Image (cartoon, rainbow, N blue to C red):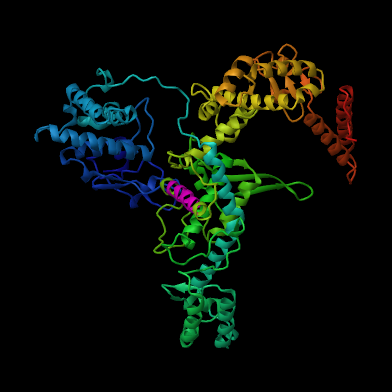
Amino acid sequence: MSIATFARHPEDVSLEDPYVLHGRPLKSGIHLQDTSRYSQDVWRLTPARLKAHESAQILNFPTLPQRFRPAAKRLFYALLSLEAPDGEESLRIATIRGKFTALKRFLKWLDRRWSPERNELAELSPADLDDYRKHLLALFPNNRARRSTLRAVLRLLWRWRRRLGEHGLRFDPLDLEGWSESKQVRQGENDTDRLPEEVLGPLLVWALRFIDDFAPDILDADRQWRRNRARRPRPRHLRRNVGARLQRLLGDYVSAGRPLPGWHGQPSLTHIAHLLGCHHSALSSHRQALDAAAAIVGVTESVFIDRVQGKLGEKPWISSISTYHNSANSLARLARHLQIACYIVIAFLSGMRDSEIKHLKRGCLEIKYDEDGRPYRWKLNSLAFKGEEDVAGIPATWTVNATVARAIRMLEQLQPAARDYLFAALPHGAGNKASANKALGTLTTNLQLNAFTAFVNRLCIEGDRPDTISAGQGHKIKLKTSHFRRTLAWFIARRPGGVIAGAMQYRHHSIQMFEGYAGTSDSGFRAEVESEQAIARGEVYMEMIDAHQHLYLAGPSAEEAARRLQDFGDRAQFQGQVATDKHRMRRIMKKHDPAVYPGEYITCVNDPSKALCEKARRGNSEGLPSHGGCLPLACRNVALTPENVAAWQREVARIDKRLASRPTLAPRLRQLLQSRRSEVVEFLTSNGQEAVPS
C-alpha cells in the first residue's frame, strides 16, 4: 500500500501496521521507525513525552480482557495519532495514559458481567452503563471527582465513534438519567492547598541554611568523591616517606581526640591514603600503627569529611559526611537535600511551575549590572508549557531575586560539568543509573521534599531546637511541588497591586486568571485577607492607644485620627481589659473599624470623599484606599506618626547624599531630586515637623 493511500485512510488500521505515534512530535534524536507499531501488545509512549522530567509510560494491552483488546487498540490509536473529531481537542500523552487506566477498570467489570460470546462494545446498552454508574457509586460513595473521571472515559467511545467503526458507542451517555451528577463548581478557582505560615517559614529558613551554611561541606565532600573516582596517578614525591607522614597524621588525630576515618569498624585505608596522597596499598605494612591509633580514638562509621565547617548554633551541623550510602549523613543523601533546598527557594520565590523549574539548564541565569558593576536584576530562562501552542515548550523568562540566583549558582556547582539540566539526578549513591528522563520526575521531587523535612526535624530533635518544620500537633505534613506556586500567589495577591504583578510573574493571560489561581473570588480569599489585615491593624491600634501615641499625631487628619482611635479604644475595652483575643478583635473591627491605615511614610485616615486616590480611580475602589495611587504630599487624609516623620527625614537625607555624590548628576536628574526635596521639606514644615532631625 502506498503512503498516499494510508494518508487518505489512516483510521483503517487493516491497511497496514502503522506506527501508533505517527501523529505526535517525538523527542529529539528518536526516529519514527524506532517507535511502537499497532500490532504490538505494548505501546511505548515515552518517545512522545517531550518534557525532560517526564517518566516512561506504556499502554499494556495484555492487562485488558482479551475480547475487548481490539476495541481498546482502535480507541487509543485514534487518541494518539488520528485527527480529532469536530469540537474535540487532541489529548496529552499523560491524559491518554490516565484514560487507559480508567477504561481498564470498566472493561474488567464488564468482562465479569457479559457472557463469553459478547465481544463488541457497540452492544453496550443504557442499562449496562447505569449499572456501572451504580457500581462506582457503591465503590466510591464520597468521591464524586473519582466517579466522574472513571465515567468520562466511556464518553470517548461516543465522541470518537466515527474513528472507531464497529467499536463505537451508539448513544451518548450524558443522555442517561443520573450519569452527569449535579455539582456546583466554582469557575476559575485553584483548589491546591497553600503552605501555612508555620510550615513555610521554617522550611525556607532551613533551605537557606543548606545553601548558605551547609553547602561548603557538601561541595567539599563532593569534590573529594569525584577525585577518588578519577583515580589520577599520584605525584612521585607523595609516594615517598609514607610511614613518617602517616605517623604525623595519626598524631594529629590522637592529639585532637578525633576518631580515624573508618569503614566497617576498621580504619579506612582508602580515605587515609587519600589524605596522604598515596595509594592505599602503601599503607598495608602500617596496619599496626593504624590499629594502635584506632584503639585510642576509635573510628568513624565511614567518612568523606570529618572536619565539618558549617555551624548550627555553636556546634557543627553534623559530625561527618559519610561514604556509607545507607547512612543519614551520607554524601548521596546530603547532596539530594541540598538540591531540594535549592528547589524550595526557586519554586517559592519565582512562582515557576515544576515543569518549568525542571527545564532550567546551566547558564540559565541572566544578571543585569548598573554602571558601577552592582547587580540590580536577575532573570531565569527556561521553557513554558501550559497554555502554549508548542507541546515541546517555548522559551520564557522569569524575573527573580538574588536569593534565587544563589540557589542557581549552587546547583551549577553540585551538578557535574558535563550535565546541563540542574535538576537531573545526582551521580552519588550506590548503583546510581542514568534515568530515561533528563530531569527528576515530579513524584521523585515530592519524595525528596518530605525526606528533607524529616532530616531537618531529626537535626532539631538531636540538637533540642524549636524550629522544626511542623504543621502542629495532630497535623501531618505532606509537601508537594504544587504547594509553592500556590502559596506565593497568596502572598503576592495580598500586596497592593499584587494581582497585576502576579498575573505578569505567573505568565497568566488575564488578571482574572491569576485571581482564580490565588483563590481571590468565591473561595473566600478576599474575606480571609481582609480579616487578617483588620486583626493586624486592630492590634496596632491598641498598641498606639495603650502608649497614648494617637494623641501626638501630626498632619491634616491628625485630630480625626485621634478621635477615631479614642472611640475604638473605648469600645475595645471590656471590663477593664484590652481585647487581645483574635475572635473578639475580629468582631470589634467588623463593627467599629476606624479605617486608619498605618504605613511607612503616612498613616491614612480614610475618608473616600477627600481621598485623592479615590478620585483618580473615579470611585471604583470598594471604599478602600489605594496604596499604589497614594498622593501623600497633597492628600487631606494624611496623619503622621513619629515613625512616619522619621521615614520622610531619611528620604531627605538620601536625596542630600545623592546630590552630593560624584560624578555630578545630569542636570535633569539633579533638578528632579531638588524639586522632590523641596516638596518633602515643605510638607514636613507645614505640618510642624523638622525636615532634618536635630
| Extent of the magenta region | 446-458
Image quarter of residue 594: top right
**Left or right of 654 in this view: 3:** left
Q: Eyeballing the image, is 311 above or below 256? A: above
Where residue 382 appears, as percent x and y from the top left, is: 55, 45
Name the quadrant of the N terminus: top left
Q: Is the magenta stretch mostly helix, strand or loop?
A: helix
Give the mark count.
0
Magenta stretch contains residue 186: no
Does residue 360 appear anywhere in the picture?
no
Does residue 327 appear anywhere in the picture?
yes
Q: Eyeballing the image, is 201 above or below 595? A: below
Image quarter of residue 550: top right
Name the quadrant of the C terminus: top right
**Left or right of 673 in this view: 103:** left
- Residue at (51% x, 64% y) in the render: 321
- Asked whether 127 or 522 is in front, the reply is 522
